[in-house]
Image (cartoon, rainbow, N blue to C red):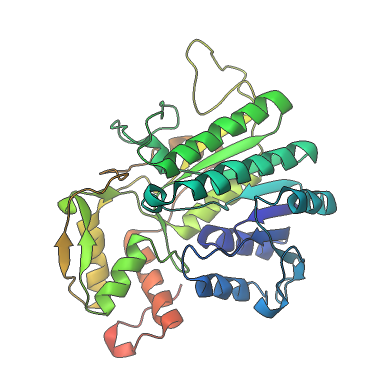
Amino acid sequence: MKILVTGTAGFIGFHVARRLLKRGDTVIGIDNLNDYYDVNLKYARLAQTGITLSDVEYAKPVTSKTFKNYTYVKLDLMDKIELENLFETYHFDAVCNLAAQAGVRYSLTNPEVYIDSNIKGFLNILECCRHFKVNHLVYASSSSVYGLNKKFPFSEHDIADHPVSLYAASKKANEMMAHTYSHLFNLRTTGLRFFTVYGPWGRPDMALFIFTKAMLEDKPIEIFNNGQMKRDFTYIDDIVDGIVHVIDSPAESNAGWDPKKPDPATSTAPFRIFNIGRGTPISLLDFVHEIEEQTHKTAQKCFLPMQDGDVAETCADVSNLAQILNYKPQTSVHTGVSRFIAWYQTFYKVQKHEIAVLPTE
């Protein structure tokens, strides 16, 4: 297939693009290379896919030196004209939209950025998919949409109308916008609610990255809600497996959908919502202990109250994706953390005596 992947200099987009390229799809990747976090990490991800930074100019297609089936374009989703030109040029079979302004806490102080990128930018994607007859739009939602829900595990079939951050609200809005386009224009759309993704090449604002860096530098780590936190940590390879399965299986309408008992995960339109998680949450303190074991460091823990916009626990019900698309997360937290630390050691050239040498695979 010819697939547009947005956010290919980002954590998940980078991994998805590589998986699609290695299996032989033609991938056009876009990213605006914003400075929400260290752009050098984004540049390094691009280099891994054969894109040389010196060749990158805004809106100019760059052919990969590693993958003949990969083209990268520096582009912002807000740039509707250039986005339309891209769709008109390449005639995509599918679009995987992973570009977004991420971060719950950042949304508390920079709300406008989330409206621009996650709402206006997503609208441009929907319009292009509509007008250029894309067969399937897959897009990133988030477990954060469950907000105040306390029914565990979180199920796509339950109502999720009480977000506690603007980031979460923007992701819920994406789902509603997608349904509208599925209903009005028969656009096949699938939203994916990711649960705490981690692994090599991960974001520096995520817990595993923050904790590993601080512990190796003998600095304290901040643990919120006095350690009473649980997360459904999901390794990047399992996330990518789920995404690729979904790309290959365009959404269908649910002929049995009952408007008197509406299922939020499906519709009479070709619209779906799936959770992608491991389905086995662990406590944040156990997660920290895993890092301690593998770095041979003892964390200096600073316990703090719950932060605004955060939730105490997440837990994914992944039975829907497992039943429909045979999704089976394979990676234990022990294995996932070890792979991340091995990558971190290599990428940041941590001295060998500071950390155990671990295999990359």
Q: In front here: 358 or 132? A: 132
Q: Is residue 93 above or below residue 330?
A: above
Picture coordinates of residue 150 (x, y %)? 28, 32
> Residue drawn 47% across and 59% down?
236
Give coordinates of residue 184: x percent, y percent: 70, 24
Front-lying residue, 285 or 255:
285
The outermost residue toward the top is 260
Horizontal placement of 319 versus 24: left or right?
left
**Furthest residue in direction right, as rendered:** 89
Residue at x 49%, y 22% (from the top left corner): 263
Q: Residue at x 18, y 49 (%)?
A: 228
Whole-percent x, y for residue 169 in the image: 45, 37
209 over 66 or under it: above or below: above
Q: How many marks?
A: 0
The vertical placement of 134 against 301, above or below, is: above
- Tell me which corner region of the image, top left, top right, bottom left or bottom right, holds residue 30: bottom right
In the rendering, at what x and y percent does residue 310 appear? 30, 45
Asked if residue 167 shows in the view, the reply is yes
- Residue 25 visible in rendering: no
Asked if residue 230 lies left or right of residue 118, the reply is: left
**What is the quadrant of residue 337 in the picture?**
bottom left
Residue displayed at 58% across by 53% down: 99
* 267 relative to 227 in the view: left or right: right
